[in-house]
Amino acid sequence: MSNASKIIRLFTSSIFTPALKEKVWKWILSPAHQQEKEESMREIWDESKWEANESTQRSYAKFRERTAVKGNKNLFFTQRLMRIAALFLLPLLTGAAVYFYMEARRPLPIEFLECVVPEGECKEITLPDGSEIQLNAGTVLIYPSRFASDTRSVYLAGEGRFKIVKNKKHPFIVKTNHLNVQVLGTTFNLKAYPADKKTTATLETGSVAIRQAGGKNVATLLPNEQLEYNNQNGTFNKKSADAAIYSGWTKGELNFVSQSLKEIMITLERSYGITILISPDLVSSDLYTIKFKQRENINEVMNIVTKTIGSITYQMVDEATISIYSSLGQKGEGNQ
């Protein structure tokens, strides 16, 4: 699956907030990888077998009228892409997204770039200001080709360790589905996968100000402090934490601190690019702490995890699928 396809699929999964969808919408209409984006939207469109109802068709007609193009030969997206994008993404648009669409009719001096990390891999990138980011498996980062405004903003869906170049005049902001993290110059780990129940920020050096996506102040962190934000109800917990543990993945470590079986399995799926089927009878509220100082193969990891938790076992269904179930009863089919 192409990078563009992965971003668009995330975008259309209804797990992005409106603010982040606006930025992805702007990226979709930027000049980079135009053909790839068009092909990805066509592919997803064909898979969806979706037909617009009468109301959607009326909205689409109104949208086309508001964004009508009149002979501008300098447009950096094709009419064909515009039609596909407008119809396919219309249900996701907000008023501000339409504004970005209107703005996209004018040549943009800044191009939005994307970095997509496949499951089972990690990547490192250097931003235009020299800041360094290590990205964990299954992560999407969208960032500008250059920082030209009062703030340096990037958009994260996944997990990253950020080492930010200090610039008092231009604060650095990492925007996620639920939280925005603002810094001047610091090192921190931010875990913000859109499908997860929690967003977690852990500070190594410096200080960060954390706000909800809507702008409300949440907390300020100092070194070795952590904020866990509940994405479902908006509550949060600020506590002391060993920051090195939470960025250990950048050194090949796998560290699980007070996590449920399901949370552990989700991380293993991302880290190894596999599917893990969990038997329904294993659902519980128990929390576990397990640490691996170096990356082991998946069989070694599963052996240790099952022995630590107890009363469960696993089976390799194939090279990319694992089934776990209770060792006290019959093996079930399992579900993810």
Image: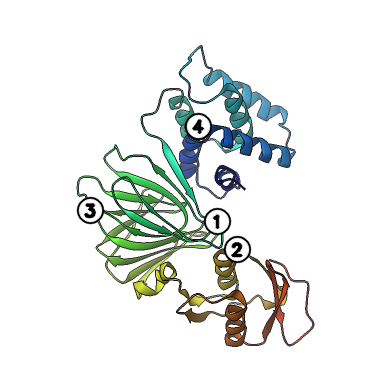
- Residue 230's place in the image compared with 284, above or below, is above
Q: Residue at x 71, y 79 (%)?
A: 325
Q: What is the residue that sits farthest to the top in this orientation?
A: 71
Residue 165 x, y percent position in the rendering: 25, 53
Q: Which numbered mark, 1 or 3, is in the foreground of this view? A: 1
Q: Residue at x 62, y 78 (%)?
A: 299
Labels 3 and 2: the sequence-earlier one: 3
Q: Residue at x 55, y 56 (%)?
A: 118
Instruction: Give the amino acid type for the residue marked by disc 4 in the picture.
Output: Leu
On screen, residue 305 versus residue 162, left or right, reads: right
The span from disc 4 to disc 1 (Cα, nearest Å) is 23 Å
Hey, which quadrant is residue 316 in on the image? Answer: bottom right
Q: Where is mark 1, residue-wise?
A: 118
Labels 4 and 2: the sequence-earlier one: 4
Looking at the picture, tell me which residue is in the foreground, 288 or 238. Answer: 288
Q: Where is mark 2, residue-wise?
A: 273
> SS class of the residue under badge 4?
loop
Q: Which numbered mark, 4 or 1, is in the foreground of this view? A: 1
Looking at the picture, tell me which residue is in the foreground, 186 or 228. Answer: 186
Q: Which numbered mark, 4 or 2, is in the foreground of this view? A: 2
The span from disc 3 to disc 2 (Cα, nearest Å) is 35 Å
Q: Where is mark 4, residue-wise?
A: 29
Instruction: Give the amino acid type for the residue marked by disc 2 in the picture.
Output: Gly
The answer to whether the residue labelled 2 contacts the one labelled 1, judged by CB atoms less than 8 Å apart, is yes
The span from disc 2 to disc 1 (Cα, nearest Å) is 8 Å
Residue 74 visible: yes
For residue 166, which numbered disc appears in the image? 3
